[in-house]
Image (spheres, rainbow, N blue to C red):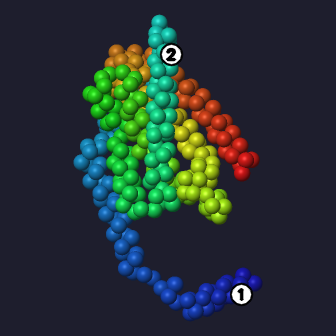
């Protein structure tokens, strides 16, 4: 029985090969191309490891040093600086919140200018998109270093860095949300004699607002971490205290600050998730 079944399977496979010989034929050129590409990537990876001085011995000694530092981090304690750390954490949250809101407010109208279905002029659309790409291409840490030299040390430089960096990102995200919006509300307003501004106000804005709000809430959570990083270079917030404690080798205070940041980010994530669900659920009920 097994032999007859095997013969039947072989007969079917041979019949398929005969009917579709082109599909079963081995493409030598394609295989050689894939093999060559894999070999090229592997060679590039090996060269990068050599050029960047990758060393397993140094990795092993570094792991031992990390284990020693982790041991010094326990138990986490703020010492006598708990009020200072809490105040700095509040400053970090304020930097992230104000920077995110400022970027969203400025980027929202620009997102309409960058959307093809709102501004059909290809030259205007291209100019706005490339401008957003230019802003978005510079990391927030670089913006922080720039604004520290412009307005000085402190949280104001951090707010400007996050606002400018997120402006480019929000502009792109908002424009893509507008371009993928449902066309039926727009067609309904146009059919009743509505103008171009009416379609934006009463069709596109209600359609994209839940997506925009969700993106802004997510970036507020992400910018809490970014505000910590830019604080290390002098842009205010708890990052300044974190780098200070690292330089002083106060590892128990370092671990406490890290735990404080993790708790704050977790709380923001929980609240923003509830707000996102509330906004999206409310919009679906209205629609």
Establish if 10 lies above or below 59: below
Query: What's the residue at 30%, 43% (across, down)?
Result: 54
| Pointers 2 and 1 in contact (C-beta within 8 Å) | no
Q: Which residue is mark 2?
A: 86
> Percent from the top left, x then y, of residue 102?
46, 34
Which residue sits furthest front?
A: 193
- Toward which corner of the image does residue 11 lie, by quadrant? bottom right
State the residue in front, 47 or 92.
92
Q: Could you give the CA–CA distance between mark 2 and mark 1, rounded to whole angstroms?
A: 78 Å
Image coordinates of residue 280 in percent, x first then y, are: 67, 45
> Which residue does the image show at 69% across and 46% down from the upper left?
283
Q: Is any part of residue 160 visible from this angle?
A: yes
Q: Residue at x 45, y 47 (%)?
A: 110
Regarding residue 232, the answer to whether it shows in the image is no
Left or right, residue 239 beside residue 191 = left
Question: Taking 60 as reference, is 110 above or below it?
Answer: below
Secondary structure of residue under mark 1: helix
């Amino acid at each position: 029985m097994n032999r007859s079944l095997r013969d039947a399977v072989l007969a079917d496979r041979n019949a398929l090969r005969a009917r579709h010989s082109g599909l079963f034929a081995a493409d030598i050129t394609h295989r050689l191309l894939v093999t060559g590409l894999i070999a090229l990537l592997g060679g590039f990876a090996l060269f990068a490891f050599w050029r960047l001085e990758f060393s397993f011995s140094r990795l092993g000694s570094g792991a031992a040093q990390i284990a020693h530092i982790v041991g010094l981090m326990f138990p986490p304690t703020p010492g006598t600086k708990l009020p200072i750390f809490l105040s700095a954490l509040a400053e970090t949250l304020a930097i992230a919140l104000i920077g995110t809101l400022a970027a969203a407010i400025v980027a929202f109208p620009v997102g309409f200018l960058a959307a093809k279905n709102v501004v059909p002029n290809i030259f205007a659309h291209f100019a706005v998109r490339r401008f957003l790409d230019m802003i978005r291409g510079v990391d927030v840490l670089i913006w922080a270093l720039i604004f520290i030299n412009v307005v000085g040390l402190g949280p104001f430089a951090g707010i400007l860095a996050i606002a400018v960096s997120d402006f480019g990102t929000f502009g792109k995200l908002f424009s893509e949300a507008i371009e993928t919006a449902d066309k039926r509300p727009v067609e309904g307003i146009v059919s009743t004699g509505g103008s171009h501004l009416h379609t934006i106000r009463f069709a596109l804005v209600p359609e994209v607002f839940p997506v925009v709000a969700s993106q802004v809430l997510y970036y507020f959570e992400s910018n809490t971490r970014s505000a910590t990083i830019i604080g290390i270079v002098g842009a205010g917030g708890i990052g300044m205290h974190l780098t200070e404690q690292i330089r002083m080798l106060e590892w128990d205070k370092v671990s406490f600050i890290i735990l404080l940041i993790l708790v704050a980010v977790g709380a923001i994530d929980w609240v923003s998730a509830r707000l996102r669900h509330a906004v999206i659920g409310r919009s679906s009920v209205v629609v």
